[in-house]
Image (cartoon, rainbow, N blue to C red):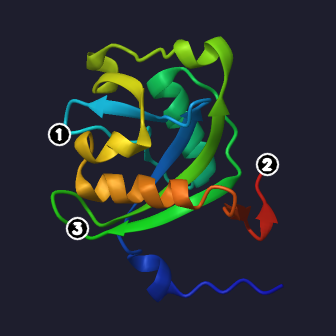
Amino acid sequence: MRTVRDPRLLAKPPVCRLGCLALLRDQAGHVLLVDPDFLDGLILPGGAANTNEPPHLAASRHLQAQTGIVRRMTHLLAVDFAPADRYLERLNLVFDAGVITGPAAQRLAVPPQHHSNLLGARFADPAHLGNLMSPAQNARVQQALANLGRSLPLLTHGQRSA
């Protein structure tokens, strides 16, 4: 196989943040949301991928750092492009983090605000998300919920990610 290295492509790569989000539900179908101190409203747990970090691993890393919950994510539920506004343009990937059962759902461990920039986390009924989130955040979550059961597998270099 031949490697193509075009200096025009490598000289100035496009700037686009990759948001890696986790859709985690409890047994009642409620969605886990976090409350960041830098935004109005709740959002899905997650954050930006580091340089060269696979997006499913970034989503898992952020979910664990923000809530203490460890999940392996292999399927994509939604892709949402957000044009530049207050932030750089970004591509948000919503991963299926599955359903949490039993006492684990009660043990959310949100780090102190000065470490996490989070005011808290909680499970919320999808029917009430419009009152808790911005319209764009709500639309993203509703579409991800609608795609449950028909998600796309995540590939890394053409291979299913483990």
How crowded is the residue under tag 1: few (<14 C-alpha within 10 Å), some, or many (20+)?
few
Q: Point out which mark residue 135 bears.
A: none
Give 90 or 4, whichever is nearer the viewer: 90
Q: Residue tagged by mark 2?
A: 162
Q: Within the image, what quadrant is residue 33 found in?
A: top left
Give 130 or 33, whichever is nearer the viewer: 130
- Side of 1 relative to 18 (left or right): right
Mark 2 to mark 1: distance in Å? 35 Å
Mark 3 to mark 1: distance in Å? 18 Å
Q: What residue do we see at 26% from left, 39% from top?
A: 132
User: What is the x, y in percent for residue 77?
Assistant: 58, 59
Q: Within the image, what quadrant is residue 122 found in?
A: top left
Q: Amino acid at mark 3?
A: Ala
Q: Is residue 88 above or below residue 102?
A: below
Q: Amino acid at mark 2?
A: Ala
Mark 1 element type: loop
Is the C-beta separation of discs 2 and 1 under 8 Å?
no
Q: Point out which mark residue 40 bears.
A: 1
Q: What residue do we see at 49% from left, 66% from top?
A: 79
Q: Within the image, what quadrant is residue 91 found in?
A: bottom left
Q: Residue tagged by mark 3?
A: 84
User: What is the x, y in percent for residue 159?
Assistant: 81, 65
Mark 3 element type: loop
Q: Amino acid at mark 1?
A: Asp
